[in-house]
Image (tube, rainbow, N blue to C red):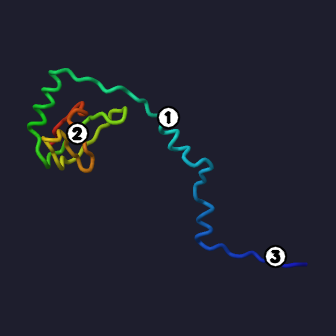
Amino acid sequence: MGSSYRRKMTPEMRAKQFQPFAALVGLTEALKSKEKIVVPKIELSEERREELDEIMGTVSEGNILKVVYFRNGEYLQITGVLSKIDIMERRLQIVNTRIKFSDIYDIEVLD
């Protein structure tokens, strides 16, 4: 009778058998993109634009802001430290996110 010799698995080989299996590469991303509801950009009234301009005049680098803004067919919200404000370019930067003034829907100074 022949002996059956079974080679011991290395820890790397053993770990591979428990890794998630993605039979369809990119399926998760494709499904997430289908979940996104694209909305048109809301045109702000002149009065609302003036209110936002007033708030923008009071903020300075280092302030903590909560900003709702439009990007790529959806409204996003970010809260963080205002790291840069560029009046000439009409853009602000919260941490690493750059936002055009014209894309801001709402802004709140938290500190």
Q: Residue at x 59, y 72 (%)?
A: 11
Disc 1 and disc 3 in contact, CB within 8 angstroms: no
Which callout, 1 or 3, points to the residue nearer the camera? 1
- Tell me the distance, in whole angstroms, between the alpha carbons under discs 2 and 3: 66 Å
Q: Mark 2 or mark 1, which has the lower sequence index? A: 1
As drawn, the residue found furthest toward the right would be 1
Looking at the rendered structure, the secondary structure element under dot 1 is helix
Q: Is residue 54 left or right of residue 28?
A: left
Q: Residue at x 17, y 48 (%)?
A: 84
Which callout, 2 or 1, points to the residue nearer the camera? 1
Q: Which mark is residue 4?
A: 3
Question: Mark 3 Cα within 10 Å, few/some/many (few <14, many 20+)?
Answer: few
Q: Residue at x 17, y 41 (%)?
A: 89
Question: Mark 2 Cα within 10 Å, few/some/many (few <14, many 20+)?
Answer: some
Residue 87, horizontal then vertical, whole percent: 13, 41
Q: Which quadrant would the N terminus be assigned to in this image?
A: bottom right
Q: Is residue 108 left or right of residue 28?
A: left
Residue 63, horizontal then vertical, whole percent: 14, 45
Q: Which quadrant would the C terminus be assigned to in this image?
A: top left
- Tell me the distance, in whole angstroms, between the alpha carbons under discs 2 and 1: 27 Å
Looking at the rendered structure, the secondary structure element under dot 3 is loop
Residue at numbered disc 2: 66
Could you tell me the amino acid type at mark 3? Ser
Residue 104, horizontal then vertical, whole percent: 23, 33
Disc 2 and disc 3 in contact, CB within 8 angstroms: no
